[in-house]
Amino acid sequence: MQKRSEILKTYKLFINGQFPRSESGHYFQLLSPKTKKPIANVARGSRKDLRDAVGAARKALPGWSSKTAYNRGQILYRMAEVLEGRKEELIAEMVKMTGATPKKAEQEVTSCIDRLVWYAGWSDKYQQIFGTVNPVAAPYFNFTLPEPVGVVGIIVSDELPLVPLVSKLAPAILAGNTVVMLASEKYPLSAITFAEMIATSDVPAGVVNILTGIKKELIAHLAKHMDVNSVNYTGSDPEILKMLQEEGAANVKRIIAHDYPKGDEWLNNERAQSPYWIHSFVEMKTTWHPIGI
Amino acid sequence: MPTLEKKVTRLEVVEPKQLNFGKKWDYAPAPESTDLVKIAPRYELFIGGKFVKPKSGNYFKSINPATEEVLTEVAEANDADVDAAVRAARNAYEKYWSKLPAAERAKYIFRIARQLQEKAREFAIVETMDGGKPIREARDVDIPLACAHFFYYAGWADKLEYAFPGRKTRPLGVAGQIIPWNFPLLMAAWKIAPALACGNTVVLKPAETTPLTSLLLAQIIQEADLPPGVVNIVTGAGKTGAALVKHPDINKVAFTGSTDVGKMIMRAVAGSGKKLTLELGGKAANIIFEDAPIDQAVEGIINGIYFNQGHVCCAGSRLFVQEGIKDIVIRKLQDRLQTLRVGNPLDKNTDVGAINSREQLNKIKELVESGVQEGCALHQSECTLPKKGFWFAPTFFTGVAQSNRIAQEEIFGPVLSVLTFRTVEEAIEKANNTAYGLSAGVWTDKGSKIFKVSSKLKAGVIWANTYNKFDPTSPFGGFKESGFGREGGLHGLMPYVELVG
């Protein structure tokens, strides 16, 4: 009997809940680390794709940010459930893409699942940790609560295929933001396969948008975009750091940069998950009201 | 038997008349005595715990904007002076401040708070003379709040481990801080108090038109016996500020001022690793609904825009009135406008003082002119303005469109733009239609509406049924192009620490 030919997957972008090809028509090839043969064509996202993604994120923001904290927690938990059910698929793809052992790949995927569950549990608690009632010296009731920053651009670390993306995605959307993520340039496949899972996890269209491509081509446009409220970067490239603040000044973006975690630190809960990461995706709003009759 | 009230047989239509009290509305002068105050003929830089002559050799004049009289001359710090101040701050950080037990650090800050309270009246008078604000405001708002800020943050110094659950804090090092001219001493307190409490040392640059209270504060700091160099004060204009921001040995930049300069600073520190907080401009919406307590709201609107001559980044400079009450609100605003007492800032009855500088006056005039040119209706107080000094009559515009410059640009003066709306959704959308996001006001007697509207407004501070209230325990700061970071409250510690562990 003849050997069956495998159906190869076309990896596309994830914008507004859909999987379009890059409008540029450009792509780049990903080679197998073992055989050096192409394993997939990856969409090379363009400035126009980025703008579409920001547009989708902005449109999704009012709906997502006004959902209850409980509801957002449920949806994050749902993402974990879907990922658990489909982890073999991600593991196999990771092994193919990175040449890692299946055990190592499994460790990463389970770490992603556990991290989603961890953050799901934070959805209705961080407000109580970071919010305050302020004892002002006059008859006013005064309180401060965290609110979403808005549309957040996230430059995902290249250190590992999936856990850096999940570790930033979860606190960002948990806090009510919508995101445009520039996926790892080195390991883009896991990001897009994970996007397929997001699409079936009750996450409304446009809340998460993921672009693959050449980061250098996209970062400047992200930093300049007047409808992006914050850019989150993990890494220590001095050129990128400088450019983010210089270009981000155009609309006073919040530029959040961390030079950690690195490598396997991403799997370490002490280093790669924290309620302070949720804090980096919020704005504080203070409200006053007189006390009287 | 008690007489019954007269039965109303018909509704009388009464034409509202303009309030006109003539001379009866005049108040006898009640000037604050300035005997208490001795302003030196010249002020030097405060570096390393001493008042030192500037290496620049230059001095600039500080004038009273209400009279244009020269009050004194003040040293201008150049790059070398700023460098000396940063070195002093670094030295103080390494040698004393970072080694001091936190409880001892607290005591120094408490000491500043207490000394400031003791000298409060003197500070209020100097603040009014140097900046032009009414003595009533300097005395009742600026100075007491500045004292309260030092007192509040002093208490935090040895309690930081409780502020951030699961984390320890580490100071950043030397903070370079630049403050504006609208609340000179209060802004100095907002900057210095949390920085010191968190264990940092400071180089502060006050605004060039209002350096005096910062320099008096330097004297208090000297008298309080703070280790030399923990607080350094360098006076000068934009160039001095730029030298501070660009200095390679500062770890933190905190700036309060215009959005344009804030953006320049953000670009200037890009890639340097300096931690940055910005408190920038605003164009706050003050929204009044039909179900608001109207008289209370009108007072709030007046206070929202004419407080401190409108030189307030969070001033309620765009008023959104629901259409059903437009006529009555405008009528009451017109009346109230006429009863505002404009004039000598040192008079205890004065509501609106002098514009801070000629430059700012020109900017206000230019924007008001644009409002007239764009076809908005001008309403202005008929008060008599003093001949000398910088003055602008309290003003508001009706018939303003969202696209008009006076509805978009920060005027930073006593000028209100009145716009209207019909539905709650429209009010929210119009209020958010600005690049700024510092503050907003909501006036309604319906509690649920307050929460609905305030949760949708993109602003860092929301005043519901009140306006322009401040407190050291209450975080202050903006969304969007009004900057980032918070000053005041627990959240005001975050910009001055690194979280570890």
Image (cartoon, coloured by chain):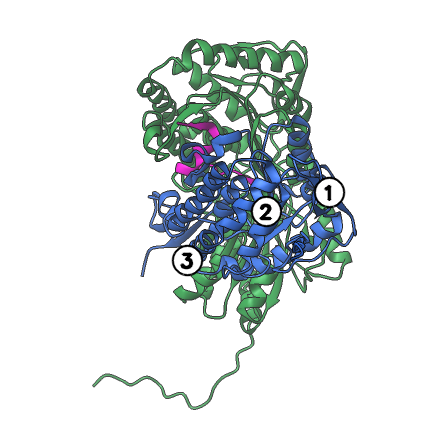
Discs 1 and 2 share one subunit:
yes
Q: Residues within 10 Å of mark 1 (few under 14, many from 20)?
A: few
Confirm whether the magenta stretch covers residue A193.
Answer: no
Reply above or below: B425 against A290: below
**In this view, which residue lies farthest toward the bottom?**
B9
Quadrant in the rendering for residue B237: top right
Q: Mark on residue A74?
A: 3
Q: Mark on residue A191?
A: 2
The percent position of residue A14, horizontal first and vertical second, equals 64, 54
**Comparing marks 1 and 2, which lies closer to the viewer?**
1
Q: Residues within 10 Å of mark 3 (few under 14, many from 20)?
A: some
Amino acid beneath label 2? Ala
Question: Which image quarter is the N terminus of chain B in?
Answer: bottom left
Give yes or no for contact between labels 1 and 3 (Cβ–Cβ under 8 Å).
Answer: no
First reached walking from the N terminus: tag 1 or tag 3: 1
Chain identifier, blue in the render = A
Front residue of this view, candidates A260 and A25: A25
Mark 3 falls on what kind of element?
A: helix
**Residue B173 shown left or right of residue B77 in the figure:** left
Identify the residue under disc 1: A29
Mark 1 falls on what kind of element?
A: strand
Give yes or no for contact between labels 1 and 2 (Cβ–Cβ under 8 Å).
Answer: no
Q: What residue sits 34% from the left and 20% below the top?
A: B102
